[in-house]
Amino acid sequence: MRPVVLIVDDEVLIRLTAADGFIDAGFAVLEAANGDEALAVLEANPTVDALFTDVNMPGSIDGFELARAAAERWPSLAVVVSSGRMARPGDLPLDTAFIAKPYCPDAAASIVRRLIDARRSLADIRPAIRLTGALPR
């Protein structure tokens, strides 16, 4: 099954270019033009594996706020934030990646895939940690 990524960017050409890169890398792609729309897409699609979002967008929340809300509500979701301005400490939730614009869509897809794989690996070992209280050897 192909991993599902939600791409959030108000700039249509940037969103389409990113979507093409993710599709070429084997992802299924959903799109949203702003943070409010993205939250609605995430609510309606529990199979989304990753969120790839811009920062500066219209609507009631920006990409940093979207990343924090998504990471809190869907902790297994891989989250990557992209912007032309650098993130400051506190902008991103833990375990969130940042990619500066302009970026190569292939590199973005590779980073998202690694985050998804890492999250899946963690999900595999969490039951063992709960049972034993320690990491498996």
Image (tube, rainbow, N blue to C red):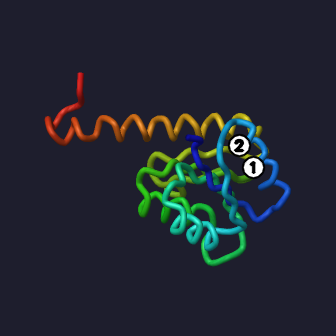
- Of 124 and 112, nearer the camera is 124
Residue 16 vertical position relative to residue 136 in the rendered view, above or below: below
Q: Residues within 10 Å of mark 2 (few under 14, many from 20)?
A: many
The image quarter in which residue 133 lies: top left
Residue at the disc numbered 2: 22
At 59% from the left and 49% from the top, the residue drawn is: 4
Q: CA distance from mark 1 to mark 2?
A: 5 Å
Report the side of 67 relative to 7 (left or right): left
At label 2, the amino acid type is Phe
Residue 37 pos. (x, y %)? 64, 71
At 82% from the left and 61% from the top, the residue drawn is: 12
Residue at the disc numbered 1: 19
Dot 2: element: helix
At 21% from the left and 37% from the top, the residue drawn is: 129
Query: Residue lying farthest bottom?
Result: 60
Report the side of 16 relative to 28 (left or right): right
At 36% from the left and 38% from the top, the residue drawn is: 122
Q: Residues within 10 Å of mark 1 (few under 14, many from 20)?
A: many
Contact? badges 1 and 2 (CB < 8 Å) = yes
Residue 24 pos. (x, y %)? 75, 38
At label 1, the amino acid type is Ala
The image quarter in which residue 30 lies: bottom right
Q: Which mark is residue 70?
A: none
Tell me the quarter of the image containing the N terminus: top right
